[in-house]
Image (cartoon, rainbow, N blue to C red):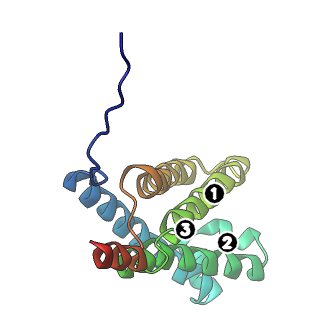
Amino acid sequence: MLAHSTTLPATAPARPARALNVTLWAGQLLLAALFLLVGYTHAVAPIEVAIQRAPWVAGLPVALVRFIGVAELAGAIGLLLPAATRVRPILTPLAAFGLATMMALAIPFHLLRGEGSAVIINLVLGALAVLVALGRTRWAPIADRAAVTRSRGSA
């Protein structure tokens, strides 16, 4: 038997399904909206307001609550801005992963305080953040604007 080589035609990388992309954007928007609201409360609102909305705030130093709030705001912005502008879109799954990590760290804190409803919220938000991180890393990554421009210029 003679072996011969065949070359396959070059194909463009497969584009993710539109439904997956829309679903990931919906998840990003939902997470960003929630973390913008909560982050504002923890980072900017008077501490009395934050305590009214989240009683656990009373058990932490104000500086830590403010730090958590700033991290939540940064994560919310990171979910949307890099993806929407296509400028360093790799930051979007990193922001989602960071928010998922925050939710994972919040679970034992709330368990120790006997706050089961907060744990459920942390699990749901953390799972959604992991899905966005995986989706934007593996299943439907967003191309960097510079890479898209280069590929169009060479075509």
Give the x, y percent position of residue 151.
34, 72
Q: Secondary structure at mark 3?
A: helix
Disc nearest the viewer among 2 and 3: 3
Judging by the rendered image, the residue that carries numbered circle 3 is 95
Label 2 vs 3, first from the N-terminus: 2
Q: Quadrant of the C terminus?
A: bottom left
Label 1 vs 3, first from the N-terminus: 3
Q: Secondary structure at mark 2?
A: helix
Three-letter amino acid code of the residue under disc 2: Val
State whether residue 69 is above or below residue 1. Answer: below
User: Residue at point 38% right, 78% down?
Assistant: 145
Left or right of 145: which side holds 64? right
Judging by the rendered image, the residue that carries numbered circle 2 is 57
User: Residue at point 66% right, 56% down?
Assistant: 106
Judging by the rendered image, the residue that carries numbered circle 1 is 101
Residue furthest top as drawn: 1
Disc nearest the viewer among 2 and 1: 1
Q: Quadrant of residue 63?
A: bottom right
